[in-house]
């Protein structure tokens, strides 16, 4: 008992060395200790920056064609070569990051925005609200996310915005379950009861008092969802169901390049590499976040 | 105690019942079972008074405290606070009244939100109830910190930077911020070291004198309760088995369970504990899912007879303000193996 | 007790000399135990009292050679029945643990494996240390459970731990600790998780075991009341050091260390009438993250002088069997209970 206490107090004193250390300070300290997560986080942020500032970084537009240069190898003019329509591969990869990240983050965010409030309501109020939500979870879990999204695309067509919408509305269950579990666990904690006893209105308890404690796992889940969504979106585009020409997308680039593998390896290899790097870095960053935000889960 | 007939008691709990359903055991079909947490509890509390509520885990003492604060849904009974029935009030009046009843928890660290600074924690009641204008809030927070004996620079720090005793002070400051007249103290010192316990008990005593507070002091330790309370109620399996002024209860404990509790308290005196008979009560507390019929203590009581197994004893007056729920209260008093715990140590 | 104990009657069963345990953490080191010395004879009950962080539990784990990582015994000797436990190979230490030294933990529920029945727990220990299997093992289990007062042991032992009540679980843990007839029993806050009436039952059982089995017992607790009723000698620890050690009767009659006196005054008493003044020890226990010179209690001590802050007082005998580590011992008759409080 006091053995454990000694360790806990000692572990705590590590953070109290700084005059005012909060939970987030401590988490940042732990995150920094994990070199793989740190490097992955930096790369993930770089990918995001490239996606945001694509028009400033890319040497050409994603649509500029130069048919005389089709399937050319790397040169000074086209650093990574061109595709079958003579479009600059580097530029397309950069713009591809833009679409892929927009879909991945947009869809995950939409899922979070739908799922978290529903999960909170179920976990907090319990009873009939919880019952209905649980049944909804079950119905949505029954149909695999990909099949559901596939059905929606078949009905309404593809495109970036629709892809975000379809992947988003099918991704809410995970967030809902997580938020429900978090609120269920926190609902009966003493500090929440203390807030009730103080007469704090329910809306304020749920947001100001409970949300900060429930936040950590949700952030982790959010980051961990991104690589999965990158993959799914790329899959749809590869099948020709997602992003349409002339827009660049990593999944579609693989599809394009696949036919010319015998002529130019780069056309297919580059987008595959992009997807691999993006999913890996987001995964490692997510794992690092999990360890940093909840040190007991290791 | 000092009851004037004109003024109703500050708190009047009448026939309080708290039952809740749990899913029972069973692998395929799970029956719902009812926990009889509190089963008809009556008591009153006056202004500036402390009522101690003692019992072992599962006796319903904490549930009683929480039901009074409406943190636990009462199944039946009535709770009157400052003359008004809490169970019949509208939401608005309730919010205003609830502020005047606060709680201090057993776990000092768990009762403080780990993501909030001490300043945020104490400011919350001020903000929610708009008790102090915004520009005076900081001043009031520092005033409250001083009141509980913490430095003003605690404001910007987080709960985990403080020790258990200091966290309990922060919790008390937060409760006081709501300007209550009545505090439920739910085992406020049982998680603390002895040397720190005394500090917190001193603080609570001083605050009561200074601010004229009423306390419902919930504890499992008769020694601590004796030091803090004017009156003491002993609970067993959801019922009060004995209630009396402290002097009366400690000098003449009637109920066999009260006597058992006294005999079980370890006395920090080797000679005395050697002298004390080792007549400890046998067995364990039965489940509150299916409390025994008749007197709930009969399964462990050395004096139990047939009557105790079928007929439930009501609380009956045995002396001035001293009530006992035992069919054989007089006999129990005489057979008390301890004599009076007070007489023993004097 | 089947083995022969080579020592004479005067030789202690357990002799801990100048034990130091520290936890090296990333940014600091916690000096949990700083020079603990204690002796225990067979048939004796030794109480180790201290508040949280005093190092009392770590001391117990050190004797078992079970200090949790990153803790390490840095210095000192632990002589048990003639063997220095620190020098023993791991294989022999394993045989001593659970065999010759039994341990009763604080929380019986978390110390029992939830997926094993009570009988499974006994089977493992009995086959490992005593070589009992099958029928013999079952019979011995029933016998052990009966000896600690568990009703209908043959049926109860087939239950899983969660089906037993808290008191029965602790009884089962005690039976488990006693399964191989240990010579030393270490109980680490054995009743902290239990209710008072159950606590009284368990402590009575503890007394009976020590009296009937002639074993040495260490009872670690924060409760001076338990020490008064259930120990023969006592060691008072503070911040990893021994402050005072004496026979229980002496300690309560004439506490010589200001910390002991302070602790005794803090203990709430059944006698007292409604108090308006509580005896507290001001301040907070120290962080043991540095090995500073001086008495660790000095910052909270009303008798402290400059000397106390700069020089560590050694543990010295002031009477036969009564030692303290203090420059300014309490010599006047101790008024543990204030006259005003002694009441009526």
Image (tube, rainbow, N blue to C red):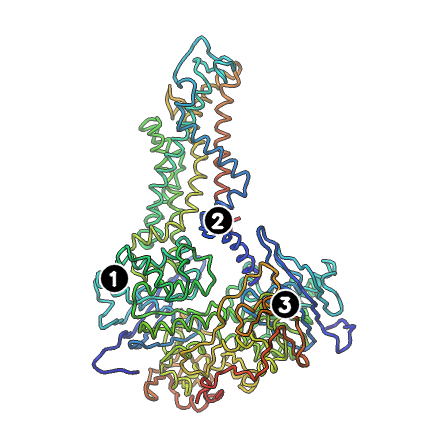
Task: Using the image, name the chain to which the residue with label 3 belongs.
Answer: C
Q: CA distance from mark 3 to mark 2?
A: 36 Å
Q: Nearer the viewer, mark 3 or mark 2?
A: 3
**Residue at the disc numbered 1:** B95
x then y, percent, for residue C60: 63, 66
Secondary structure category for the residue under label 1: helix
x then y, percent, for residue A3: 58, 61
In this view, the residue in front, A39 or C42, is: A39
In this view, the residue in front, A233 or A292, is: A292
Secondary structure category for the residue under label 2: helix
Q: CA distance from mark 3 to mark 1?
A: 57 Å
Q: Quadrant of the N terminus of chain C?
A: bottom right
Residue that sits furthest to the top in the current view = A68
Q: Are marks 3 and 1 on the same chain?
A: no
Q: Is residue A288 above or below residue B150?
A: above
Residue B209: quarter of image:
bottom left
**Residue at the disc numbered 3:** C312
Q: Residues within 10 Å of mark 2 (few under 14, many from 20)?
A: some
Task: Using the image, name the chain to which the residue with label 2 belongs.
Answer: A
**Residue at the disc numbered 2:** A26
Which label sits on residue B8? none
């Amino acid at each position: 008992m006091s053995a454990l206490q000694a360790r806990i107090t000692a572990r705590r004193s590590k953070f109290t060395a700084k005059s005012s250390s909060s939970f987030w300070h401590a988490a940042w300290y732990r995150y920094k200790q994990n070199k793989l997560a740190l490097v992955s986080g930096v790369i993930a942020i770089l990918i995001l920056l490239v996606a945001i500032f694509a028009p400033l970084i890319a040497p050409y537009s994603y649509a500029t064609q130069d048919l005389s240069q089709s399937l050319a190898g790397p040169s000074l003019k086209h650093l990574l070569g061109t595709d079958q329509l003579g479009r600059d591969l580097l530029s397309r990869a950069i713009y591809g990051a833009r679409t892929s990240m927009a879909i991945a983050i947009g869809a995950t965010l939409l899922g979070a925005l739908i799922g978290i409030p529903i999960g909170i309501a179920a976990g907090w109020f319990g009873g009939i609200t919880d019952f209905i939500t649980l049944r909804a979870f079950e119905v949505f879990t029954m149909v695999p996310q990909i099949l559901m999204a596939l059905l929606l695309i078949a009905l309404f067509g593809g495109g970036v915005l629709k892809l975000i919408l379809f992947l988003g509305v099918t991704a809410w269950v995970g967030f809902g379950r997580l938020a429900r579990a978090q609120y269920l666990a926190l609902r009966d904690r003493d500090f929440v009861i203390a807030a009730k006893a103080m007469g704090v209105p329910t809306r304020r308890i749920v947001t100001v008092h409970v949300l900060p404690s429930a936040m950590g796992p949700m952030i982790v889940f959010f980051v961990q969802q991104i690589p999965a969504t990158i993959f799914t979106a790329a899959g749809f585009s590869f099948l020709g169901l997602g992003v349409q020409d002339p827009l660049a997308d990593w999944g579609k680039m693989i599809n394009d390049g696949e036919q010319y593998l015998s002529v130019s390896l780069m056309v297919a290899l580059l987008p595959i590499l992009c997807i691999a790097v993006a999913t890996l870095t987001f995964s490692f960053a997510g794992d690092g976040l999990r360890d940093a935000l909840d040190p007991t889960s290791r | 105690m000092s009851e004037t007939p004109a003024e109703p008691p500050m708190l009047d709990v009448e026939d309080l019942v708290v039952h809740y359903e749990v899913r029972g055991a069973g692998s395929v079909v799970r029956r719902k079972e009812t926990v009889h947490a509190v089963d008809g509890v009556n008591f009153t509390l006056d202004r500036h008074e402390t009522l101690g509520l003692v019992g072992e885990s599962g006796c319903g003492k904490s549930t009683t405290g929480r039901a009074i604060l409406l943190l636990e849904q009462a199944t039946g009974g009535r709770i009157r606070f400052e003359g008004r029935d809490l169970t019949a009030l509208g939401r608005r009046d309730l919010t205003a009244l609830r502020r005047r009843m606060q709680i201090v928890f057993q776990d000092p660290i768990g009762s403080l939100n780990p993501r909030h600074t001490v300043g945020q924690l104490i400011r919350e009641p001020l903000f929610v109830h708009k008790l102090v204008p915004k520009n005076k809030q900081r001043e009031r927070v520092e005033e409250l910190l001083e009141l509980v004996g913490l430095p003003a620079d605690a404001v910007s720090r987080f709960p985990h930077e403080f020790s258990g005793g200091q966290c309990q002070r922060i919790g008390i400051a937060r409760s006081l911020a709501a300007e209550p007249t009545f505090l439920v103290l739910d085992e406020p010192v049982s998680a603390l070291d002895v040397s720190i316990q005394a500090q917190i008990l001193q603080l609570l005593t001083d605050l009561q004198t200074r601010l004229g507070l009423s306390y419902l002091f919930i504890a499992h330790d008769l020694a601590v309760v004796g030091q803090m309370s004017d009156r003491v109620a002993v609970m067993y399996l959801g019922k009060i088995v004995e209630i009396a002024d402290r002097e009366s209860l400690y000098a003449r404990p009637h109920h066999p369970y009260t006597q058992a509790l006294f005999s079980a308290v370890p006395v920090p005196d080797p000679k005395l504990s050697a002298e004390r008979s080792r007549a400890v009560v046998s067995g364990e507390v039965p489940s509150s899912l299916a409390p025994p019929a008749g007197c709930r203590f009969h399964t462990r009581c050395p004096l139990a007879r047939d009557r105790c197994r079928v007929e439930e004893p009501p609380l009956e007056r045995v002396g001035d303000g001293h009530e006992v729920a035992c069919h054989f209260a007089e006999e129990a008093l005489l057979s008390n193996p301890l004599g009076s715990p007070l007489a023993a140590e004097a | 007790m089947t083995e022969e104990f080579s020592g004479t009657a005067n030789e202690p069963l357990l002799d801990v000399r100048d034990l130091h345990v520290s936890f090296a953490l990333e940014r600091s080191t916690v000096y949990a135990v700083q020079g603990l010395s204690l002796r225990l004879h067979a048939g004796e009950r030794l109480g180790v009292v201290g508040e949280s962080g005093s190092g009392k539990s770590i001391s117990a784990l050190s004797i078992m050679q079970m200090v949790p990582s990153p803790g390490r015994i840095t210095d000192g000797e632990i002589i048990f029945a003639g063997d220095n436990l620190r020098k023993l190979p791991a294989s022999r230490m394993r045989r001593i643990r659970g065999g010759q030294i039994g341990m009763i933990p604080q929380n019986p529920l978390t110390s029992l494996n939830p997926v094993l029945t009570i009988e499974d727990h006994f089977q493992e220990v009995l086959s490992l240390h005593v070589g009992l299997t099958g029928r013999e093992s079952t019979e011995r289990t029933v016998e052990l459970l009966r000896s600690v007062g568990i009703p209908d042991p043959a049926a109860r032992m087939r239950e899983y731990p969660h089906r037993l009540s808290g008191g029965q679980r602790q009884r089962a843990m005690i039976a488990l600790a006693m399964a191989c007839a240990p010579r030393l029993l270490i109980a680490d806050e054995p009743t902290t998780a239990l209710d008072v009436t159950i606590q009284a039952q368990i402590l009575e059982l503890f007394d009976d075991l020590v009296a009937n089995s002639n074993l040495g017992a260490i009872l670690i607790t924060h409760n001076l009341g338990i020490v008064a009723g259930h120990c023969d000698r006592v060691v008072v620890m503070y911040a990893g050091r021994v402050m005072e050690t004496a026979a229980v009767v002496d300690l309560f009659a004439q506490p010589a260390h200001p910390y002991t006196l302070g602790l005794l005054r803090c203990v709430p008493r059944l006698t007292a009438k409604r108090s308006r003044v509580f005896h507290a020890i001001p301040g907070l226990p120290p962080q043991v993250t540095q090995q500073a010179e001086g008495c660790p209690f000095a910052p909270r001590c009303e008798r402290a002088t400059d000397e106390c802050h700069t020089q560590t007082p050694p543990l010295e005998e002031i009477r036969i069997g009564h030692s303290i580590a203090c420059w300014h011992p309490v010599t006047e008759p101790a008024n543990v209970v204030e006259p005003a409080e002694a009441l009526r």
